[in-house]
Image (cartoon, rainbow, N blue to C red):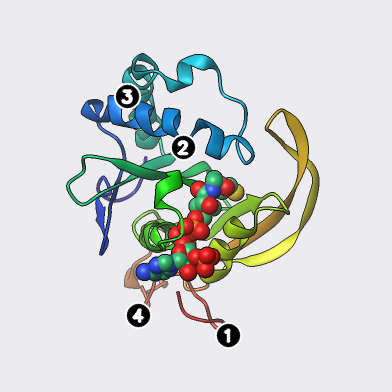
Amino acid sequence: MTRGPLPRLVTERLVVRPPGPSDAARVARYWRANEAFHARSSPVQREEFYTDAFWEERIPSLAAERRRGESLRVFLFDPREERVLGHASLTRITRGAFHAANLGYSLDRRAEGRGLMTEALRALLAHAFGPMGLHRVEANHLPSNRRSAAVLRRLGFRREGLARDYLLIDGRWQDHVLNSLTNREWIAPGASPESGRPPRRGAGRPSVRGRRRV
Ligand SMILES: CC(C)(COP(=O)(O)OP(=O)(O)OC[C@H]1O[C@@H](n2cnc3c(N)ncnc32)[C@H](O)[C@@H]1OP(=O)(O)O)[C@@H](O)C(=O)NCCC(=O)NCCS
Protein backbone atom coordinates (compact mmCIF):
# COMPACT_ATOMS: atom_id res chain seq x y z
CA MET A 1 0.00 0.00 0.00
CA THR A 2 1.11 3.56 -0.65
CA ARG A 3 2.01 5.09 2.68
CA GLY A 4 0.36 8.28 3.87
CA PRO A 5 -2.74 10.03 2.64
CA LEU A 6 -3.55 10.66 -1.02
CA PRO A 7 -1.17 13.47 -1.90
CA ARG A 8 -2.48 16.88 -2.88
CA LEU A 9 0.61 19.03 -2.90
CA VAL A 10 0.01 22.76 -3.07
CA THR A 11 3.02 24.82 -4.09
CA GLU A 12 3.37 28.53 -4.81
CA ARG A 13 2.02 28.23 -8.37
CA LEU A 14 0.69 24.68 -8.70
CA VAL A 15 -1.52 21.95 -7.38
CA VAL A 16 0.24 18.62 -7.80
CA ARG A 17 -1.99 15.58 -7.40
CA PRO A 18 -3.09 12.31 -8.96
CA PRO A 19 -5.85 12.69 -11.57
CA GLY A 20 -9.46 11.96 -10.63
CA PRO A 21 -12.14 10.62 -13.01
CA SER A 22 -13.26 14.18 -13.86
CA ASP A 23 -9.75 15.02 -15.14
CA ALA A 24 -9.80 12.56 -18.07
CA ALA A 25 -10.52 15.16 -20.76
CA ARG A 26 -7.95 17.69 -19.53
CA VAL A 27 -5.29 14.99 -19.16
CA ALA A 28 -5.95 13.75 -22.72
CA ARG A 29 -5.82 17.35 -23.97
CA TYR A 30 -2.43 17.81 -22.26
CA TRP A 31 -0.88 14.77 -23.98
CA ARG A 32 -2.48 15.66 -27.35
CA ALA A 33 -1.30 19.27 -27.28
CA ASN A 34 2.26 18.18 -26.47
CA GLU A 35 2.62 15.12 -28.66
CA ALA A 36 5.27 16.71 -30.88
CA PHE A 37 7.01 18.51 -28.01
CA HIS A 38 7.40 15.27 -26.00
CA ALA A 39 8.24 13.04 -28.97
CA ARG A 40 12.02 13.29 -28.72
CA SER A 41 12.10 12.32 -25.04
CA SER A 42 9.23 9.80 -24.84
CA PRO A 43 8.26 6.33 -25.98
CA VAL A 44 6.04 6.26 -29.06
CA GLN A 45 2.43 6.07 -27.87
CA ARG A 46 -0.51 4.39 -29.56
CA GLU A 47 -3.20 6.63 -31.09
CA GLU A 48 -5.71 5.94 -28.31
CA PHE A 49 -3.31 7.35 -25.67
CA TYR A 50 -4.42 10.80 -26.86
CA THR A 51 -8.15 10.18 -26.47
CA ASP A 52 -10.51 11.03 -23.60
CA ALA A 53 -11.78 7.44 -23.65
CA PHE A 54 -8.29 6.08 -22.96
CA TRP A 55 -7.88 8.30 -19.89
CA GLU A 56 -11.39 7.54 -18.62
CA GLU A 57 -10.20 3.93 -18.32
CA ARG A 58 -6.61 4.62 -17.39
CA ILE A 59 -7.25 6.96 -14.44
CA PRO A 60 -8.99 4.30 -12.30
CA SER A 61 -6.23 1.81 -13.10
CA LEU A 62 -3.60 4.35 -12.04
CA ALA A 63 -5.48 4.76 -8.74
CA ALA A 64 -5.39 0.97 -8.27
CA GLU A 65 -1.63 0.91 -8.96
CA ARG A 66 -1.20 3.66 -6.38
CA ARG A 67 -3.21 1.74 -3.78
CA ARG A 68 -1.03 -1.32 -4.40
CA GLY A 69 2.04 0.83 -3.79
CA GLU A 70 3.41 0.25 -7.31
CA SER A 71 3.43 3.82 -8.60
CA LEU A 72 2.40 7.38 -7.92
CA ARG A 73 1.51 9.41 -11.01
CA VAL A 74 0.60 13.04 -10.56
CA PHE A 75 -0.26 15.95 -12.81
CA LEU A 76 0.69 19.58 -12.35
CA PHE A 77 -2.44 21.74 -12.36
CA ASP A 78 -2.81 25.50 -12.37
CA PRO A 79 -4.08 26.80 -8.98
CA ARG A 80 -7.71 26.66 -10.20
CA GLU A 81 -7.12 23.06 -11.31
CA GLU A 82 -8.56 23.80 -14.74
CA ARG A 83 -5.49 23.07 -16.86
CA VAL A 84 -2.84 20.39 -16.82
CA LEU A 85 0.60 22.00 -17.04
CA GLY A 86 2.69 18.88 -16.69
CA HIS A 87 3.05 15.41 -15.27
CA ALA A 88 5.41 13.59 -12.92
CA SER A 89 5.55 9.93 -12.00
CA LEU A 90 7.20 7.70 -9.46
CA THR A 91 7.10 4.24 -10.99
CA ARG A 92 8.71 0.85 -10.43
CA ILE A 93 8.41 1.42 -6.69
CA THR A 94 10.39 -1.36 -5.06
CA ARG A 95 10.52 -2.04 -1.32
CA GLY A 96 12.57 -4.73 0.51
CA ALA A 97 16.19 -3.66 0.65
CA PHE A 98 15.69 -1.00 -2.04
CA HIS A 99 12.84 1.43 -1.12
CA ALA A 100 13.40 3.11 -4.47
CA ALA A 101 11.44 4.48 -7.42
CA ASN A 102 12.01 5.83 -10.89
CA LEU A 103 11.07 9.45 -11.58
CA GLY A 104 9.67 10.69 -14.89
CA TYR A 105 8.33 14.14 -15.79
CA SER A 106 7.22 16.46 -18.56
CA LEU A 107 5.76 19.94 -18.99
CA ASP A 108 3.35 21.57 -21.34
CA ARG A 109 5.41 23.32 -24.02
CA ARG A 110 4.02 26.71 -22.96
CA ALA A 111 4.91 26.10 -19.29
CA GLU A 112 8.61 25.53 -19.96
CA GLY A 113 11.22 28.01 -18.71
CA ARG A 114 9.30 29.20 -15.62
CA GLY A 115 10.71 26.93 -12.93
CA LEU A 116 7.45 25.00 -12.64
CA MET A 117 8.95 21.52 -12.92
CA THR A 118 11.57 22.20 -10.28
CA GLU A 119 8.83 23.60 -8.02
CA ALA A 120 6.61 20.55 -8.51
CA LEU A 121 9.40 18.01 -8.09
CA ARG A 122 10.61 19.62 -4.86
CA ALA A 123 7.16 18.98 -3.41
CA LEU A 124 6.92 15.48 -4.89
CA LEU A 125 10.36 14.47 -3.61
CA ALA A 126 9.52 15.73 -0.12
CA HIS A 127 6.45 13.48 -0.28
CA ALA A 128 8.50 10.55 -1.63
CA PHE A 129 11.13 10.81 1.09
CA GLY A 130 8.57 11.70 3.77
CA PRO A 131 5.17 9.95 3.85
CA MET A 132 6.12 7.39 1.17
CA GLY A 133 9.27 6.36 3.03
CA LEU A 134 11.48 6.00 -0.05
CA HIS A 135 15.24 5.96 0.28
CA ARG A 136 16.26 6.46 -3.34
CA VAL A 137 14.79 8.11 -6.42
CA GLU A 138 16.36 7.46 -9.81
CA ALA A 139 15.89 9.66 -12.87
CA ASN A 140 17.38 9.26 -16.30
CA HIS A 141 17.60 11.44 -19.38
CA LEU A 142 18.96 11.46 -22.89
CA PRO A 143 22.49 12.88 -22.99
CA SER A 144 21.19 15.65 -25.24
CA ASN A 145 18.36 16.66 -22.87
CA ARG A 146 20.04 19.69 -21.34
CA ARG A 147 16.86 21.02 -19.70
CA SER A 148 16.11 17.72 -17.99
CA ALA A 149 19.71 17.49 -16.74
CA ALA A 150 19.41 21.03 -15.33
CA VAL A 151 16.20 20.18 -13.46
CA LEU A 152 17.88 17.21 -11.78
CA ARG A 153 21.00 19.22 -10.95
CA ARG A 154 18.89 21.91 -9.29
CA LEU A 155 17.19 19.25 -7.17
CA GLY A 156 20.51 17.81 -5.96
CA PHE A 157 20.55 14.58 -8.03
CA ARG A 158 23.96 13.00 -8.61
CA ARG A 159 25.02 11.76 -12.01
CA GLU A 160 25.90 8.07 -11.77
CA GLY A 161 26.87 7.03 -15.26
CA LEU A 162 25.73 6.29 -18.76
CA ALA A 163 23.53 3.30 -19.62
CA ARG A 164 23.91 2.10 -23.21
CA ASP A 165 20.78 1.43 -25.32
CA TYR A 166 18.72 1.97 -22.18
CA LEU A 167 15.20 2.96 -23.31
CA LEU A 168 13.12 2.75 -26.47
CA ILE A 169 12.58 6.47 -27.03
CA ASP A 170 11.14 8.01 -30.18
CA GLY A 171 11.31 4.52 -31.74
CA ARG A 172 15.06 3.92 -31.10
CA TRP A 173 17.07 2.32 -28.28
CA GLN A 174 18.90 5.26 -26.80
CA ASP A 175 21.66 5.78 -24.22
CA HIS A 176 20.60 7.52 -21.01
CA VAL A 177 22.42 9.39 -18.27
CA LEU A 178 21.58 7.77 -14.91
CA ASN A 179 21.04 9.99 -11.87
CA SER A 180 19.86 9.47 -8.33
CA LEU A 181 18.94 11.26 -5.14
CA THR A 182 19.02 9.44 -1.80
CA ASN A 183 17.63 10.28 1.59
CA ARG A 184 20.47 9.79 4.04
CA GLU A 185 18.10 10.43 6.92
CA TRP A 186 15.87 7.52 5.94
CA ILE A 187 14.45 5.53 8.82
CA ALA A 188 12.81 2.13 8.58
CA PRO A 189 9.04 2.37 7.99
CA GLY A 190 7.20 1.99 11.26
CA ALA A 191 10.38 2.52 13.29
CA SER A 192 9.67 3.96 16.72
CA PRO A 193 11.64 4.67 19.88
CA GLU A 194 10.64 1.17 21.10
CA SER A 195 12.16 -0.43 17.99
CA GLY A 196 15.47 1.20 18.74
CA ARG A 197 15.28 3.45 15.63
CA PRO A 198 13.88 6.74 16.88
CA PRO A 199 12.69 9.15 14.18
CA ARG A 200 15.29 11.85 13.81
CA ARG A 201 14.83 15.56 13.34
CA GLY A 202 14.49 16.33 9.64
CA ALA A 203 13.77 12.71 8.75
CA GLY A 204 11.91 12.35 5.50
CA ARG A 205 13.57 15.27 3.75
CA PRO A 206 16.03 14.60 0.95
CA SER A 207 19.55 14.97 2.27
CA VAL A 208 21.72 17.24 0.23
CA ARG A 209 24.64 17.27 2.65
CA GLY A 210 27.62 18.83 0.99
CA ARG A 211 25.46 20.08 -1.84
CA ARG A 212 23.23 23.05 -2.41
CA ARG A 213 19.97 22.61 -0.47
CA VAL A 214 16.92 22.08 -2.70
C1 LIG B 1 12.53 18.73 -18.99
C2 LIG B 1 11.55 19.86 -18.74
C3 LIG B 1 10.48 19.41 -17.76
C4 LIG B 1 12.35 21.04 -18.13
O1 LIG B 1 11.50 22.18 -18.05
P1 LIG B 1 12.09 23.58 -17.52
O2 LIG B 1 11.02 24.57 -17.62
O3 LIG B 1 13.38 23.86 -18.20
O4 LIG B 1 12.43 23.23 -16.02
P2 LIG B 1 12.17 24.09 -14.71
O5 LIG B 1 10.78 24.00 -14.30
O6 LIG B 1 13.16 23.63 -13.71
O7 LIG B 1 12.47 25.58 -15.17
C5 LIG B 1 13.78 26.08 -15.22
C6 LIG B 1 13.83 27.24 -16.17
O8 LIG B 1 12.87 28.21 -15.78
C7 LIG B 1 13.53 29.50 -15.60
N1 LIG B 1 12.72 30.26 -14.62
C8 LIG B 1 11.94 31.31 -14.97
N2 LIG B 1 11.27 31.75 -13.89
C9 LIG B 1 11.66 30.98 -12.85
C10 LIG B 1 11.29 30.96 -11.49
N3 LIG B 1 10.40 31.81 -10.97
N4 LIG B 1 11.86 30.02 -10.68
C11 LIG B 1 12.75 29.15 -11.18
N5 LIG B 1 13.12 29.13 -12.49
C12 LIG B 1 12.57 30.03 -13.32
C13 LIG B 1 14.93 29.10 -15.22
O9 LIG B 1 15.84 30.14 -15.45
C14 LIG B 1 15.17 27.93 -16.18
O10 LIG B 1 15.32 28.38 -17.49
P3 LIG B 1 16.74 28.29 -18.26
O11 LIG B 1 17.17 26.85 -18.21
O12 LIG B 1 16.41 28.74 -19.63
O13 LIG B 1 17.63 29.18 -17.48
C15 LIG B 1 10.88 20.35 -20.08
O14 LIG B 1 11.89 20.83 -20.93
C16 LIG B 1 10.10 19.25 -20.79
O15 LIG B 1 8.98 18.94 -20.42
N6 LIG B 1 10.70 18.69 -21.85
C17 LIG B 1 10.05 17.66 -22.67
C18 LIG B 1 9.84 16.38 -21.88
C19 LIG B 1 11.13 15.90 -21.23
O16 LIG B 1 12.21 16.08 -21.77
N7 LIG B 1 10.99 15.26 -20.05
C20 LIG B 1 12.12 14.73 -19.32
C21 LIG B 1 12.51 13.41 -19.87
S1 LIG B 1 13.97 12.81 -19.05
Q: Earlier in the sequence, mark 4 or mark 1?
A: 4
Residue extending farthest to the bottom is 210
Q: Residue at x 43, y 57 (%)?
A: 117
Residue type at tag 1: Gly
Where residue 43 appears, x then y in whole percent? 62, 31
Q: Within 10 angstroms of label 1, few (less than 14), some, or many (20 or more) residues?
A: few
Q: Earlier in the sequence, mark 1 or mark 2?
A: 2
Q: Earlier in the sequence, mark 2 or mark 3?
A: 3
Ligand 1 has an atom within 8 Å of the beta carbon of the residue at disc 2 = no
Residue type at tag 4: Arg
Can you tell which quarter of the image residue 42 is in?
A: top right
**Does the CB distance between marks 1 and 2 fall below 8 Å?**
no
Using the image, tell me which numbered label, if any, was put on residue 210: 1
Drawn side of residue 126 relative to residue 181, left or right: left
Q: Earlier in the sequence, mark 4 or mark 3?
A: 3
Residue type at tag 2: Glu
Whole-Å distance between the Cαs marked 2 and 3?
14 Å
Residue tagged by mark 4? 201
Q: Within 10 angstroms of label 3, few (less than 14), some, or many (20 or more) residues?
A: some
Whole-Å distance between the Cαs marked 2 and 4?
28 Å
Where residue 123 appears, x then y in whole percent? 35, 61
Residue type at tag 3: Pro
Residue tagged by mark 3? 60
**Element assignment for label 4:** loop
Is residue 163 something one can see in this rendering?
yes
Whole-Å distance between the Cαs marked 4 and 1?
18 Å
Quadrant in which the C terminus appears: bottom left
Q: Within 10 angstroms of label 2, few (less than 14), some, or many (20 or more) residues?
A: some
The image shows residue 1, relative to residue 148, as above or below, that is above
**Does the CB distance between marks 4 and 3 fall below 8 Å?**
no
Q: Residue at x 26, y 45 (%)?
A: 6
